[in-house]
Amino acid sequence: MRRPLLTLILVAAIAAGCESKPEPPDRTAPAPTGSTVAGLDWPTYHGTPDRAGRSAQTPTLHRLSSAWARHLDGKVYASPVVGGGRLFVATENNTMYAIDPRTGQITWHQQVASPVPLSVLPCGNIDPLGITGTPVYDAATRRVYAVAETRADGRVKHDLVGFDAGTGRVVLRRSADPPSQDPVPMQQRAALSLIAGVVYVAYGGLDGDCGDYHGHVVGVPTDRDRAPTFYRVPVTREGGIWAASGPAVRKDGSLLVAVGNGESTTYDDSDSVLALSLPALKRTTLFAPSRWRKDNAADADLGSMGPAVLADGRTVIAGKNGEIYLLAAGDLGGIGGQVALIMDCRGFGGAAVDGNVVFLPCTSGILQVRVGPGNRLSTGWHATQASGSPVVGGGAVLAVNSDDGDLYALDAGSGRVRARLHVGALTRFATPALWGDYVFVGTKRGIVAARVA
């Protein structure tokens, strides 16, 4: 598809520090009223700010069938989101698409800037690098937000871009880069969170951990009159916050983030789960394994999977070392302060939560974990067919296998395969989104929709 007009004017307006007003995109359509889709929105990664990944609207799942597929202008690493009756899909070509979720018709698309080619980066594994973190939809303002990695005048940067959900017009663009940090070795893979008019953006490093990068969370207000807030992991280097699920919101309103390994042998918030207060982004409590020094030295940290928050405030977390930790509500326990620990999961991505049952995305397959009375933690079924970040709906756990390109529906109680559907070439962290009786999966070619029956 051709790019929107007036691209040069847009760049000049941004350089001057003013709000961009590009021409309307190629296709427009009246915004749906939303009256027929009330309660069905899936506006953020895993549907809700706590990243539970559970849909109560999905009908009982017996089989999956292909509904439609669309070839887009780049690979889709971000999970799709749905708001106001529209499906929003972001590509690594820095393009946002608004799509009719029932028919697959593209209602508008907007490329905000050229992406960054891998050849100009010190390391990495995405080429080109554009929008990687999952966007977030704001029902109050009917806007959808994404972070685009771009290059202007030879300088790499990360911009928060806000789109009008009805027309695709860019209504906000401002820097999301942390202060005093070279943006070149930074990667924005984590899903965005939106709370009280502030978009929270987490950063890690490029694949290969090259360069002088530091894990950050940046709170970017959608109102230009307010200044951003920042949290920087106090490491000498590394400590990335890069799990695809992004920050999770606890019942007390704080953010939970999982932090990767650092270089220091003195504790510095690396290999940890941190609670950050809002909107100031101050660390209030933490958990780190007793073996954090060993984890850091072996790149076996907690940063690979986002925290799974239960309804009662307790948290389940698994990282690269194979241990599964249960953390108390409120105070996370400090170093070695878990309330329970079991083995058997190297977790990558985002977990799903259904009551006191957690479904973990382990490298060996989806693992069911039960949280019982008295902080008892136990494993249930283990399904080796799929290892991608799961979601739950219709009595089934849905997750992909990026090796065979298939979407699996596993019985939530037993783990047996209820249905399987080929969706095409997938990225490692491809995560389904649920909307009524539809399942959406981003692929290396675009977006695929399946129907539940």
Image: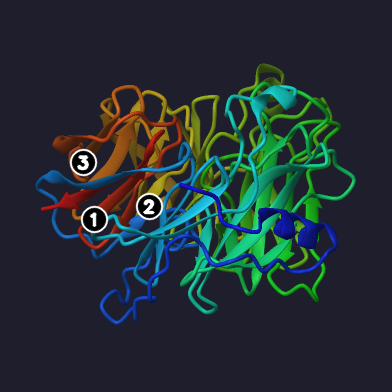
- Figure label count: 3
Circles 1 and 3, Cβ within 8 Å, touching? The answer is no
Q: Position of residue 421 (x, y in %)?
A: 19, 36
Q: Which residue is mark 3?
A: 409
Query: Would residue 252 appear left or right of 411 to someone viewing this image?
Result: right
Query: Would residue 273 appear left or right of 19 to someone viewing this image?
Result: left
**Residue type at tag 2:** Val
Q: Which numbered circle lies on residue 438?
A: 1
Front position in the image: 316 or 224: 224
Q: Which of disc 3 and disc 1 is earlier in sequence?
A: 3
Q: Which of disc 2 and disc 3 is earlier in sequence?
A: 2
Q: Which of disc 1 and disc 2 is earlier in sequence?
A: 2
Q: Which residue is mark 2?
A: 353
Q: Position of residue 401 (x, y in %)?
A: 32, 29
Front position in the image: 319 or 379: 319
Label 1: element kind? strand
Q: Nearer the viewer, mark 1 or mark 3?
A: 1
Q: Residue at x 29, y 74 (%)?
A: 37
Distance (Cα) linking label 3 and label 2: 16 Å
Q: Is residue 87 visible?
A: yes
Distance (Cα) linking label 2 and label 1: 20 Å
- Classify 10 Å Cα crowding around label 1: few (below 14), some (14-19), many (20 and above): many
Q: Is residue 274 visible?
A: no
Q: Nearer the viewer, mark 2 or mark 1?
A: 1
- Name which quarter of the figure residue 198 lies in: bottom right
Is residue 326 shown above or below 102? above
**Residue type at tag 3:** Ala
